[in-house]
Image (cartoon, helix red, strand yellow):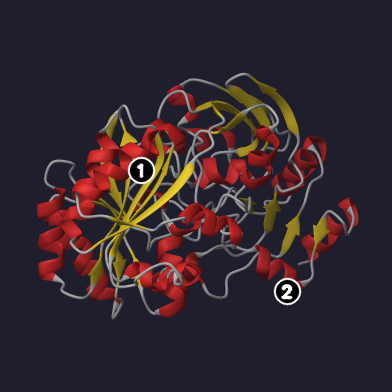
């Protein structure tokens, strides 16, 4: 705390916040989605919050931290689910929200400050006739750098893939954690992979150049199905039909949609649902295909959401889990990648082995050029042992699991580039001060 006071005296009270309630709040993300992480991480917080107003001030804060060997955790909007930004060793929570300038917007690409929210960016891009290629369901609060350093994909991934797919993240500007911080311009797939989904371990993102898509007036469609297989078959048909332009196909097993509180006036609540965002010219084709598969379309769904000032995307991806938790606060979730050829059999096996404990929820995405079912099944939580038994069973049946109940980067199932991340950490963070404790491959230095 003595160093925190010195830091505040150096940079001022507007830049360095010490009030305990504020620091605790800014030291949190949505780790409580996981009952495992809630038990592990409750009580952790930083010693102060640093809010640099420009790159020069950021560099000075990093230099101060290195000179005094103070750990530092970069933070964006705090919408992650894995405790990525929770400080395990106190120190500085680096809030990047004021590094939010628009550097440039070109045709097909743009460069923006790390702390700009994706919601603000969406509004800004409308003026150029463009939009984000993909974004998380938390986009109103998520920051650009926070999404890159802690996310994977989202609404739009059915067309453009994930953060790792070439052509999405084009360039990053990184500041190193050294006494004299360096400014690195990073390009190329392997170099960029050192900073994508890295939990801020290998460097501080200060701005990013990303690819953009032409603005489309997406139409929201929602259908109910009596039969779960009919919902899956229809969703797969639309996902794989290349002539149909879409941004989202989200499928929920009953009774998940019963927890969509704002949609209760138009939903049955006991049916399986398929939520689609599609280009206007393909709405009628989708509508007819759905009817042939047993769909009951929610008439006027887009008009209903508009009248209630709702975002249809708030009922997809991990927002599904959030709505479920409002009604069933003890539930949780896992992240599962089912095999695109045998996913129905795998899902049946999981439901048979754990009846009433697993509710399926699928988003179709593109990964490595292939359309695949990416799933976030909701789990009725009883014990940690039972939760991990369900994940182990998934793996035995060929389902790839990304474990959302760990704060360790390489245990989360998205560790294909962990060697590259650790290599960059050794080069850019010689005292292991960036988010220490979030990887088991790099021991926290004794001086931390």
Please tell me the numbered disc located at residue 21: 2
Q: Residue at x 52, y 64 (%)?
A: 30
When asked about the image quadrant of residue 49, the answer is bottom right
Residue 315 shows in this picture? yes
Label 1 crowding class (10 Å Cα cut-off): few <14, some 14-19, many 20+?
A: some
Q: In this view of the protein, which residue sits in the foreground, 26 or 65?
A: 26
Compare marks 1 and 2 and give the one earlier in the sequence: 2
Q: Is residue 99 left or right of residue 440?
A: right
Q: Residue at x 70, y 47 (%)?
A: 96
Q: Is residue 182 left or right of residue 190?
A: right
Whole-percent x and y of residue 390?
A: 20, 66
Whole-percent x and y of residue 77?
A: 63, 54
Q: Which corner quadrant holds the N terminus?
A: bottom right
Residue at mark 1: 415
When asked about the image quadrant of residue 298, the answer is bottom left
Number of marks drawn: 2
Q: Is residue 73 left or right of residue 289?
A: right
Q: In this view of the protein, which residue sits in the foreground, 368 or 197?
A: 368
Q: Residue at x 36, y 75 (%)?
A: 331
Whole-percent x and y of residue 259?
A: 41, 72
Label 2 crowding class (10 Å Cα cut-off): few <14, some 14-19, many 20+?
A: few
């Amino acid at each position: 705390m003595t160093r925190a006071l010195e830091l505040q005296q150096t940079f001022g009270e507007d830049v360095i916040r010490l009030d305990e309630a504020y620091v605790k709040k800014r030291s949190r993300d949505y780790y409580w989605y996981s009952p495992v992480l809630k038990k592990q991480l409750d009580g952790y917080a930083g010693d102060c919050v640093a809010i640099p107003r420009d790159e020069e001030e950021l560099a000075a804060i990093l230099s101060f931290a290195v000179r005094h060997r103070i750990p530092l955790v970069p933070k964006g909007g705090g919408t992650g689910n894995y405790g990525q930004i929770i400080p395990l060793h106190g120190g500085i929570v680096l809030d990047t929200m004021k590094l939010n300038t628009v550097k440039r917007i070109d045709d097909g690409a743009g460069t923006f400050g790390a702390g700009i929210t994706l919601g603000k960016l969406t509004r800004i891009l409308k003026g150029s006739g463009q939009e984000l290629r993909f974004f998380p369901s938390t986009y109103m609060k998520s920051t650009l750098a926070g999404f890159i350093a802690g996310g994977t994909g989202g609404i739009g991934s059915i067309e453009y893939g994930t953060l790792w797919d070439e052509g999405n993240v084009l360039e990053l500007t990184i500041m190193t954690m050294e006494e004299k911080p360096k400014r690195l311009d990073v390009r190329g797939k392997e170099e960029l992979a050192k900073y994508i989904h890295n939990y801020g371990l290998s460097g501080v993102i200060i701005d990013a150049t990303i690819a953009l898509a032409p603005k489309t007036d997406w139409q929201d469609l929602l259908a109910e199905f009596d039969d779960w297989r009919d919902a899956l078959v229809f969703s797969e048909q639309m996902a794989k039909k290349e002539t149909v332009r879409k941004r989202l196909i989200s499928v929920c097993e009953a009774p998940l949609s019963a927890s969509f509180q704002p949609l209760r006036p138009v939903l049955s609540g006991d049916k399986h649902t398929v939520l689609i965002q599609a280009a206007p010219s393909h709405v009628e084709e989708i509508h007819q295909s759905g009817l042939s598969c047993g769909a009951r379309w929610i008439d006027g769904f887009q008009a209903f959401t508009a009248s209630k000032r709702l975002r249809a995307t708030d009922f997809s991806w991990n927002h599904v889990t959030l709505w479920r938790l409002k009604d069933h606060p003890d539930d949780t979730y896992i992240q599962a990648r089912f095999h695109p050829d045998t996913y129905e059999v795998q899902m049946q096996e999981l439901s048979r082995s754990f009846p009433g404990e697993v509710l399926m929820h699928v988003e179709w995405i593109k990964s490595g050029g292939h359309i695949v079912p990416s799933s976030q099944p909701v789990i009725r939580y009883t014990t940690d042992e039972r939760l991990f038994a369900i994940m182990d069973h998934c793996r035995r049946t060929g389902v790839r699991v990304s474990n959302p109940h760990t704060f360790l980067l390489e245990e989360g199932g998205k560790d294909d580039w962990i060697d590259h991340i650790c290599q960059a950490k050794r080069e850019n963070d010689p005292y292991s001060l960036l988010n220490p404790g979030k990887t088991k491959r790099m021991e926290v230095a004794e001086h931390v």
